[in-house]
Image: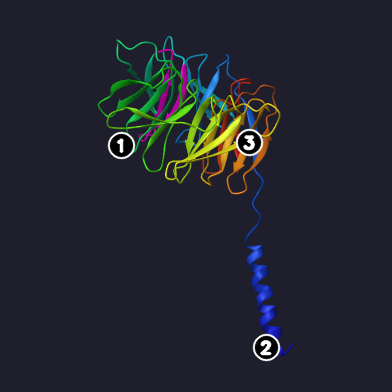
Amino acid sequence: MNRMTRRAALKTLASAAVAAAGTPPAAAATLQSWPLGTPHRTGIHDVAPAPDGGVWFTAQRSGELGWFDPARGRTELVPIGRGSAPHGVVRGPDGAAWITDGGLGAIVRVGWPGRDVRVFALPADAPYANLNTATFDHDGNLWFTGQSGVVGRLALPEGKVTLKDAPRGSGPYGICTTPGGDVWWCSLAGSFIARIDRRSGESQIVEPPTPRQGARRVWSDSQGRLWVSEWNSGNLSSFDPKGNAWRTHKLPGASPRAYAVYVDERDHVWVSDFGANAVLRFDPGSATFQPFPLGREAASVRQILGRPGEVWLPESGSEHISVIRT
């Protein structure tokens, strides 16, 4: 090897060493948990990251909105009102917590940080809706599901609530908005997913390939593909509306029960499995699951939500709140 060739080779090796030193390997995801430490049992159900670094959760049993501060490990409870039984919570475009309250039969807004409570009741002649989950569309309107068989909209800022009977009756559960602005929901009892026509409020059904699978929750990835947790079948399925194509992935283990689903900023899919008492991360690229076992029996993670680098988990069975830092 001549002097010029040797010099070039050494330069290449040095450049590679600098690049390797400046690019540390990806850190492993870690799970951390806290007991809520409240004076009474809350029935923690759904979670949503708050704008101040805390995390909201619905206290379905005690009728409150919870706020957990991970920096101090402390919990605050905001009373919603007599008869309240909140199910879902999402962060609105206004930075407030928006709640589907099955006990009140209403959508509830809790201003943040003011903690003022405003109630948007369903129409007076509406039957019991068993309100479940909500999502904001790109126009700032709130869409929501009711397991008794309704899909509704809260038009903002005027505050008018309208309801539509869901196709095939009872079962509407999870709901989400895609990056393109479409609103999709799924039916646990009806075992299908559906897209809402946002002008008419009517829903168009899309049938999954597995019959009676129990589509419980639905979430969109960055490409508009829909990921569905199937409670009865134990599958995690995806539907691509552009290609009208389904893919189905069975959760590992003998008796999986897929409850919640959430897609993070890297398009990794998180699903809670009641059968394994674990949360799993699914990598669509390699089609592999990575389990994160939960430290308490029957933790029962009923919903998952997060922000970049954090995946938050409400443990309704153990009165804990957990985070997986990615």
The residue sitting at 55% across, 17% down in the picture is: 43
Dot 1: element: loop
- Magenta span: 86-104
Tell me if residue 207 comes above or below residue 15 in the rendering. above
Dot 2: element: helix
Location of residue 266 in the rendering, given as x and y in whole percent from the top left corner = 53, 47
Q: Residue furthest right?
A: 1
| Residue position marked by numbered label 2 in the rendering | 4
Question: Do the numbered discs 3 and 1 sit on residues whose CB atoms are within 8 Å?
Answer: no
Location of residue 226 in the rendering, given as x and y in whole percent from the top left corner = 48, 38
Location of residue 33 in the rendering, given as x and y in whole percent from the top left corner = 64, 30
Figure quadrant of the N terminus: bottom right
| Residue position marked by numbered label 1 in the rendering | 139
Q: Disc 3 to disc 2, how far (Cα)?
A: 53 Å
Figure quadrant of the C terminus: top right
| Residue position marked by numbered label 3 in the rendering | 280
